[in-house]
């Protein structure tokens, strides 16, 4: 579904990604894990067209999308859940969700019914301003907004960041449920154990380079992963 090939990305004169390559097959959850500053968010931004790679390619469903503007990439069927559950604070819940339906406006009622079934708390708070929601509720709203366009592929940027442990578990259960309902997931996450427990495959990004990749069951047994990320 998604193929990133030899991606190099700079911020000014500073190189952040050094020849990153990865693949995501339809129906998978693929995790990208690594420490702060490794380039994980830059990788997502490069896929989304928010940052222009200097070289390399990004292909989605057989079509190259690197070089397209971000709105055109979204129209291809890719959505994103930004870090920290960023929402429109002075809009209510429903208005936030309708913003996510911009590319599928004619199907917004169907999409609303879908996300309200997935997140019944949002239905209860439909007229509540987003800035008055709890951190977990804002994260739910950010996920629901990303699903309003009924994407083929959803990118998650640190969905567990800043959340209480019970909410972290709920968010990861939602990610799994989304995949079960037909949405492919590319998951960037610092909570390495939880990411590897729910994903099919993973890439370890360190210092802008992929240093490991493989099935998650194998990576969980890796000495490097156990020492560097699991405290074992």
Image: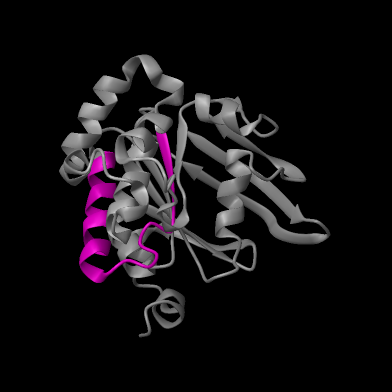
In the image, residue 210 above or below residue 86: below
| Residue visible at 35% across and 31% down in the picture | 148
In front: 88, or 10? 88
Whether residue 215 is visible: yes
Position in image of residue 226 (x %, y %):
39, 78
* Lateral position of residue 9 relative to residue 206, left or right: right
Q: Quadrant of residue 152?
A: top left
In front: 213, or 105? 105
Q: Which residues are magenta?
A: 153-179
* Lateral position of residue 13 relative to residue 52, left or right: right
Looking at the image, which residue sits at the far right?
13
Looking at the image, which residue sits at the far top?
106
In front: 180, or 130? 130
Position in image of residue 209 (x %, y %):
63, 62
In front: 105, or 54? 105
* Lateral position of residue 26 relative to residue 118, left or right: right
Q: Count the labels in the image.
A: 0
| Residue visible at 55% across and 39% down in the picture | 3
**Residue 88 is covered by the magenta coloring:** no
Position in image of residue 131 (x %, y %):
37, 53
């Amino acid at each position: 579904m998604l193929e990133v090939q030899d991606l190099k990305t700079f911020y000014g004169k500073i190189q952040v990604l050094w020849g990153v390559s990865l693949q995501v097959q339809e129906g998978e959850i693929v995790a990208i894990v690594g420490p702060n500053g490794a380039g994980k968010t830059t990788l997502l931004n490069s896929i989304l067209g928010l940052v222009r790679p200097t070289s390399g390619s990004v292909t989605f469903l057989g079509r190259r999308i690197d070089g397209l503007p971000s709105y055109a990439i979204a129209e291809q069927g890719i959505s994103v859940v930004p870090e920290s559950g960023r929402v429109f604070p002075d809009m209510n819940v429903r208005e936030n969700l309708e913003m996510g339906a911009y590319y599928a406006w004619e199907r917004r009622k169907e999409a609303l019914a879908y996300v309200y079934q997935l997140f019944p708390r949002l239905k209860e708070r439909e007229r509540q301003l987003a800035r008055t929601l709890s951190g977990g509720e804002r994260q739910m709203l950010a996920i629901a907004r990303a699903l309003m366009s009924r994407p083929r592929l959803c990118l998650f940027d640190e969905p567990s960041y800043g959340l209480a442990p019970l909410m972290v578990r709920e968010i990861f259960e939602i990610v799994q449920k989304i995949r079960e309902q037909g949405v492919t997931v590319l998951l960037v996450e610092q909570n390495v154990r939880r990411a590897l427990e729910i994903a099919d495959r993973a890439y370890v990004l360190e210092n802008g380079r992929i240093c490991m990749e493989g099935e998650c069951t194998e990576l969980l047994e890796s000495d490097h992963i156990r020492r560097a990320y699991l405290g074992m």
